[in-house]
Image (cartoon, rainbow, N blue to C red):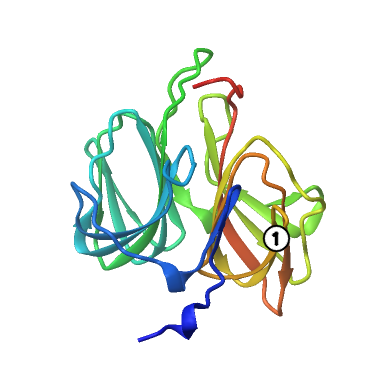
């Protein structure tokens, strides 16, 4: 059966990807049981990190990561149990957990669940001790106006400091709010729209975006977002951080 005669908002360009839910394909991964993955970004795309949506059956669990990989988990719906050594935490919607490279852990679904999973090779800093695990609930974090604009609020889920080589934030826009400038920078991004929608400028293209869409932005991709509609727009965004551009 033809699906809208091949029409989609998804678009792949040299410096960005817009991936919409009508084009998502599920795949299993070795070492995982009871989990399907939508792999949004990875090295085959040109990204230096992996970002996935994991869809868990009850009891399903993530595979053990390679010892050099860091992992960040953000729950979209359902409940996940995260066990680190002998300590267990139950994450509900908007709960998150950062697990540094080498941390012995297990992520298992207490109920059917969906979660964002981000994995990145560790780039240790010789100037500081290794990063520590951390967890919390996004709604409990303090909110900061971006550039002093109260209509654009940022919540930072990763600790700030040289030990941590990436950041994961949520950004919430009041209807009509927008970034103050077109950004062009060395960091790359992975972004999942959580609520609402608007218009994204990526490179020389303009895209309507809505909740459920994923965006990858390569380093130096021109980028800008403005929220449209009658409800706030919100997304989860990853960026590499705190490392020299020549660092491997």
The image quarter containing residue 234 is bottom right
231 lies left or right of 119: right
Closer-to-camera residue (120/158): 120
Q: As displayed, is residue 26 above or below residue 141?
A: below
- At which x and y percent is residue 211? 55, 70
Residue pictured at 59% horizontal, 52% vertical: 16
> Tag 1: Cα neighbours inside 10 Å, few (<14), some, or many (≥20)?
few
Position of 187 with respect to 121 (left or right) is right
Q: Quadrant of residue 232?
A: bottom right
Task: Estimate the x, y position of residue 233 in percent, counting from the top left.
Answer: 65, 68
Identify whether 94 is placed above or below 240.
below
Q: Nearer the viewer, residue 155 or 53?
A: 53
Q: Quadrant of the N terminus?
A: bottom left
Residue at x 24%, y 51% (from the top left corner): 29
Closer to us: 243 or 82? 243
- Residue occupying the point 52% across, 55% down: 138
Residue at label 1? 205
Locate residue 55, reporting x and y percent. 31, 63
Identify the element where label 1 is drawn: strand
Residue 203 left/right relative to 68: right
Q: Is residue 52 above or below residue 68?
A: below
Would you say 108 lies left or right of 213 here? left
Residue 113, percent from left and from top: 32, 65
């Amino acid at each position: 059966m033809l699906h809208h005669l091949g029409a989609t908002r998804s678009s792949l360009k040299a410096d960005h990807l817009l991936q919409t839910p009508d084009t998502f394909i599920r795949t299993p991964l070795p070492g995982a049981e009871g989990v399907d993955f939508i792999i949004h970004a990875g090295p085959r795309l040109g990204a230096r990190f992996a970002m996935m949506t994991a869809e868990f059956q009850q009891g399903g669990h993530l595979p053990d990561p390679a010892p050099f990989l860091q992992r960040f988990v953000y729950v979209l719906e359902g409940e996940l149990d995260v066990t680190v050594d002998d300590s267990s935490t139950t994450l509900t919607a908007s709960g998150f957990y950062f697990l540094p490279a080498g941390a012995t852990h297990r992520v298992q679904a207490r109920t059917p669940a969906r979660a964002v999973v981000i994995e990145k090779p560790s780039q240790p800093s010789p100037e500081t001790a290794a990063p520590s695990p951390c967890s919390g609930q996004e709604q409990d974090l303090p909110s900061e106006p971006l550039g002093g604009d109260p209509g654009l609020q940022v919540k930072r889920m990763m600790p700030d400091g040289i030990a941590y080589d990436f950041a994961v934030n949520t950004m919430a826009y009041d209807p009509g709010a927008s970034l103050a400038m077109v950004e062009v920078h060395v960091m790359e991004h992975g972004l999942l729209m959580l609520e609402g929608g608007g218009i994204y400028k990526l490179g020389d293209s303009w895209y309507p975006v809505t909740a459920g869409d994923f965006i990858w932005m390569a380093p130096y991709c021109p980028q800008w977002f403005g929220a449209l509609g009658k409800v706030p727009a919100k997304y989860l965004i990853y960026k590499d951080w705190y490392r020299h551009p020549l660092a491997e």
